[in-house]
Image (cartoon, rainbow, N blue to C red):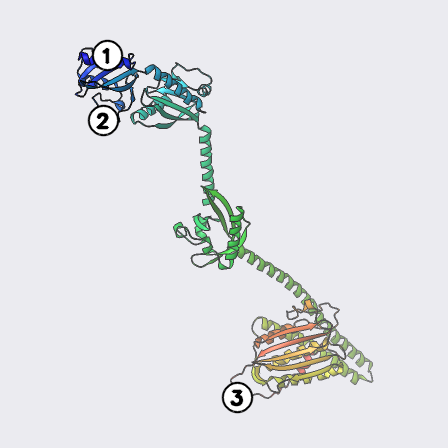
Amino acid sequence: MTNNKQVIEKSILDLALTDVGFLAVNKENNILYKNEKFNKLWGIPNYDNNFDLINSIINKQIRKSDKIDLKYPKDKETLKSEKILYLNNGRVIKMTHRLLYDKNTQSMIWVFRDDTEKFGEEKKYSQNEILNALTEPAYITDSKGNLLDYNERFVKYFNGIDIINKNIWKLFDKEAKEKLLKSDKILIENELENISLNIKKDEKTIKVKKSVINKKEEISILNIFSDISIQKNLVKKLYESRQRYRKLYENSPDAVYILEYGKIIGANKKGLELLNISDYLDIKEDSLLKYIHPDYHSTYKKEYKKLIENKDSTPLYEAKVLTTQGNIKDVEVKFSVFPHEGRLLSYTVVRDITKRKKEMKLRKIAEEKLIDAVEYNKLTTEFFANLSHEFRTPLNIILATVQLMNTQINNKDIDIDSKMKKYIKTMRQNCYRLLRLINNMIDITKIDSDFYRLRKENLNIVGLIEDITTSVVNYMSNRNIKFVFDTDKEVINTAVDSDAMERIILNLLSNAIKFTNEGDKIEVKITKQDREVIISVKDTGIGINEEKKGIIFDRLGQADKSLTRKQEGSGVGLSIVKGLVELHDGEITVESEYNNWTKFVIRLPITSLKQTGIKKDVYENRVEKINIEFSDIYL
């Protein structure tokens, strides 16, 4: 062994390793040599050369993760050139190796050097770099919570208190201290890289992030402080704000849909109610366009395209939606765009205005009815004013005539007979006027209340109208008015009420005569067209003002309502004519050019009653009727 020892010592001296401890073992794992420094470094007696015992003593001092095996290596190529050993007592040992060959043996020399002091300086320098690089308050403790180092920001955070070599736990209350120590224990026992916790400090919430910065040597824990009070308050406010917006969204009186590329990805309660849907899943991922009425598809697409292009809200526009039951609702639609988690979404408000539309329609109808009522009240007032005039005028004439007759009789006038005839004629005509007025009032009331009944019979309407017009030719001749009767058919058989038809024609001719000047013309024309008979009465008189044409068929409607008008009449004649024509399922219209001509056109359907033969055109009371209808015309 002496020769081996000399060889080994010479080899060690050659390698300048006199300041280290070493152990030499051969291939059989017998200890060839160990020096005094090795024994002192590991606490091994000089006389103890038991390899297994020495190997065990050394490994008990080394941390579990750094265990070594001092046996002669079978695979020398896998050996690391050096290894750092972290001891349980905090020392740091650097381990290297050398292979030694001579003619007698091969041995492995394990070399050990105590680098605790050197590693302490490097460690401190490394910790300082970490601390100074941080922008937050930070400090470093060992595994037992003892303060090792801290940065300037940590001192400033604690109002400039120098706590080096002082008890750091005085800076925290009992609860915070317990939480910090407990987190250290969890970090170390579970071999975690880092852990975070929140503690309270001076009514502030502090987030402490703990990280292990040295695992191999004595464990050091980096503690970084972050005051999250403001952040936490902002988070709280953000949460409250989100809750408010969610409540606004959920409790909105309008339907709200969240759209992505036009598809529904969210809908509030009113949104489901609007479309008569109970479960949101029934419309999820549907296109909102599916529920827009087809008439509004182009407007919807245009507004949505504008929204995406401009990334701004669109103005309200009206549309209609279709519910799942097929009902149609009036709505107002407004798009707004907002970003969410990198996506561009649309906040779409759809307001149900169906009720409002109905109310507006009803209000409009009510307003129109109110206007009509006011106008009708005005017409009624005018009518009764005219009516009183119409009654007063013939009564005054009759009274004056009676007074004249009395005077003539009292004076024993010689020519009393001829004068009496004239007076009686005047009285009769005014009695006719009163009778016509009463008849008109009765008939218009019957027509309005649907009590007027026609007595139709199959007649040749051409012959009927020709007889009626012929009966009034004298009235026209006396006023020097030209009269023309024209027809394209001599016989047109249809079912009509002869009395009603007589009244219609006489009224139209009476008006034509009253409003036609001397030398003008009145023309009555009858034509057949398909299953209709068309009767027109045209005059070349004063015509009708354009704005008056719309009211002349209304009851009380007169072109001239003044009490000083040139022609007499109550204003119900044409209203009766229209009612009688419509009772025949026909219609009457008027055409006119003011100051030139007026034309009334009657269209009656050609019908037939189930009866034998056609009645002869015999009318016994026509003269009386003419006298009544023409009582406003003085010859």
Q: Is residue 116 visible?
A: yes
Query: Residue 388, how many percent across, how many down?
Result: 70, 69
Picture quadrant of residue 90: top left
Query: Residue 129, how many percent across, how many down?
Result: 42, 21
Amino acid type shown at disc 3 = Thr
The image's mark for residue 35 is 1
Q: Is residue 470 left or right of residue 295?
A: right
Q: Is residue 374 left or right of residue 154?
A: right
Q: Residues within 10 Å of mark 2 (few under 14, many from 20)?
A: few
Who is closer to the viewer here, 13 or 244? 13
C-beta proximity under 8 Å, tags 3 and 1: no
Residue at disc 2, secondary structure: loop
Residue at disc 1, secondary structure: loop
Query: Residue 507, how many percent across, how many down?
Result: 66, 77
Q: Residues within 10 Å of mark 1 (few under 14, many from 20)?
A: some
First in sequence: mark 3 or mark 1?
Answer: 1
* For residue 32, above or below residue 438: above
Amino acid type shown at disc 1 = Asn
Amino acid type shown at disc 2 = Asp
Q: Is residue 253 visible?
A: no
**Quadrant assignment for the C terminus:** bottom right
Query: Residue 199, how many percent across, how many down?
Result: 39, 25
Q: Nearer the viewer, mark 2 or mark 1?
A: 2
First in sequence: mark 2 or mark 1?
Answer: 1
Picture quadrant of residue 97: top left
The image's mark for residue 612 is 3
Q: Nearer the viewer, mark 3 or mark 1?
A: 1
Distance from the alpha carbon under mark 3 to that under mark 2? 139 Å
First in sequence: mark 3 or mark 2?
Answer: 2
Residue carrying label 2: 75
Who is closer to the viewer here, 366 or 129? 129
